[in-house]
């Protein structure tokens, strides 16, 4: 449907949000609060993925004699959390587009923190039987609902407060918060793995989950200090709003929602294969878990400067060419990644993770926030991102570790996993080629003049 013929103001790239410019202090508060909240939010979310690879298969899903079978079931719980994300994206998108971004960010952090703390005190299958995996999956669903709204809310809080000429650079801070959250969660598991094996299996794995309570309280305190986004405040002031955003965005912007889906698809699958499946594949090969965890920690830290640099580059040359480079890198990195990881040598394992996480994901995650936010109009943006990105998170990211582990268990080889990753990467390449440039040359020049 051609929305230009209906309302050109609604379908135009939402980079021009009006004459009101946020103060430098407001922008810094928005960035700091969003990033720190992301650190806390994704610390909680990544804990499950790490625990699923290391302990949940034995403690909550003791199925059969092959340990990969229990791990597949544990990653099934990981996938269920992703299935809940579109529901959370729709609910949070409705609240965010109707009542504001800040309310959503408080709600998602509280929900995520409560679910994570309860996972840390949950009895195992041996203690309460089938109720243990059922409760674990239920808490994972709560995590998924919260994550479905958190990602979009944190991006919009930054993007909608940032000057036009710096939106790529500033929005790129959001994935840096997620990277730090992953580093904290992985570091927590690295520390507790120094406990004797029996103690780690019985109670040591619970400590990282319990520690999240302190982090969530801190996050809620910080988020109270941030105001509503400037762009959303302008929409409310002009009464340019939708009563049912989720319906309106599908009617008015179906192509944009599908584009968000495709742009996220390959990046989501690659992310969770490199994060979660790397640990499982390392165990399959007999590589020390500490090598993989330390390599992931190092590569995630290195992805931060890559993402920040890429976000800045996208402000100079546009979003599309930068994102296309990252999408192509998914396909190019597959064979070096599995070859280096399969060598079993420490420095090659680290190199594989740096190529995959620091460079490939760093490029994609640095360019993605501003790119997909600018595809949608302000008053439907939260809902559009919630539907497109979170549906893609289910089909791309959520199923990826389980599918990859199942392929490994059946074929006892990484070749089918590499083919699978190549296919999803190709989908994102095609989507990027078909997507419109959301920050074209003329707009970049105008934004630069305005900033001077």
Image (cartoon, grey):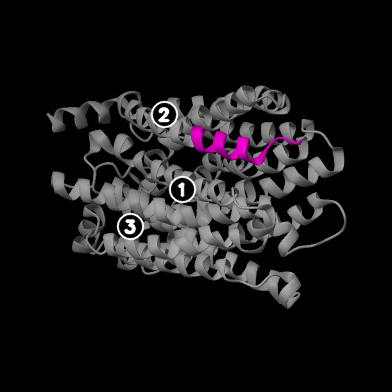
Q: Quadrant of the C terminus?
A: top left
Tell me the element at label 3.
helix
The x and y percentages for residue 111 are 45, 68
Mark 1 is surrounded, within 10 Å at the Cα level, by few (under 14), some (14 to 19) or many (20 or more) other residues, namely: many
- Whether residue 290 is in magenta: the answer is yes
Q: Earlier in the sequence, mark 1 or mark 2?
A: 1
Residue on which disc 2 sits: 306
Residue at 28 percent of width and 47 percent of height: 31
Q: Is residue 278 above or below residue 45?
A: above
Q: Which stretch did the figure color magenta?
A: 286-299
Residue at 37 percent of width and 48 percent of height: 5
The x and y percentages for residue 371 are 40, 38
Which numbered dot is residue 184? 1
Residue 41, image quadrant: bottom left
Q: Earlier in the sequence, mark 3 or mark 2?
A: 2
- In this rendering, position of residue 138 left or right of residue 129: left
Tell me the element at label 1.
helix
Residue 292, image quadrant: top right
The label nearer to you, 3 versus 1, is 1
Residue on which disc 3 sits: 379
- In this rendering, position of residue 214 left or right of residue 358: left
The x and y percentages for residue 11 are 35, 47
Q: Earlier in the sequence, mark 3 or mark 1?
A: 1
How far separated are the C-alphas under marks 3 and 1?
A: 35 Å
């Amino acid at each position: 449907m051609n929305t230009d013929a209906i309302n050109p103001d609604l379908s135009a790239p939402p980079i021009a949000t009006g004459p009101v410019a946020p103060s430098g202090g407001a922008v810094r508060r928005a960035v700091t609060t969003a990033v720190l909240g992301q650190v806390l939010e994704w610390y909680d979310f990544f804990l499950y993925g790490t625990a699923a690879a290391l302990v949940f298969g034995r403690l909550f899903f003791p199925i059969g004699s092959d340990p990969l079978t229990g791990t597949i079931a544990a990653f099934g719980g990981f996938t269920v959390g992703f299935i809940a994300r579109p529901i959370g994206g729709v609910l949070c998108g409705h609240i965010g587009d109707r009542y504001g971004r800040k309310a959503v960010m408080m709600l998602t952090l509280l929900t995520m923190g409560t679910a994570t703390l309860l996972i840390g005190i949950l009895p195992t299958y041996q203690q309460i039987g089938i109720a243990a995996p059922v409760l674990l999956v239920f808490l994972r669903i709560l995590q998924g609902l919260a994550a479905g709204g958190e990602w979009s809310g944190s991006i919009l809080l930054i993007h909608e407060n940032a000057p036009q000429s710096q939106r790529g650079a500033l929005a790129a801070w959001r994935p840096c918060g997620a990277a730090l959250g992953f580093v904290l969660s992985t570091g927590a598991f690295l520390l507790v793995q120094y406990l004797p094996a029996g103690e780690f299996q019985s109670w040591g794995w619970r400590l990282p989950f319990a520690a999240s309570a302190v982090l969530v309280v801190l996050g809620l305190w910080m988020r109270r200090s941030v105001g509503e986004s400037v762009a959303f405040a302008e929409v409310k002031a002009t009464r340019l709003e939708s009563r049912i955003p989720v319906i309106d965005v599908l009617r008015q912007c179906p192509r944009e929602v599908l584009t968000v889906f495709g742009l996220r698809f390959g990046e989501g699958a690659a992310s969770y294969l490199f994060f979660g499946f790397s640990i499982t594949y390392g165990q399959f090969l007999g590589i020390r878990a500490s090598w993989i965890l330390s390599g992931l920690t190092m590569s995630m830290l290195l992805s931060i400067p890559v993402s920040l640099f890429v976000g800045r580059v996208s402000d100079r040359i546009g979003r599309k060419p930068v994102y296309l480079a990252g999408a192509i890198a998914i396909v190019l990195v597959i064979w070096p990644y599995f070859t280096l990881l399969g060598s079993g040598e420490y420095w090659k394992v680290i190199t594989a993770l740096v190529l995959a996480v620091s460079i490939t994901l760093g490029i994609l995650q640095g360019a993605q926030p501003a790119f997909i936010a600018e595809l949608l109009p302000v008053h439907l943006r939260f809902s559009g991102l919630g539907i497109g990105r979170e549906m893609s998170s289910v089909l791309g990211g959520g199923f990826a570790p389980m599918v990859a582990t199942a392929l490994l268990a059946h074929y006892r080889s990484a070749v089918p996993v590499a083919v699978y990753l190549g296919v999803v990467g190709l989908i994102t390449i095609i989507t990027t080629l078909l997507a419109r440039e959301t920050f074209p040359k003329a707009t970049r020049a105008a934004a630069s003049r305005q900033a001077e």
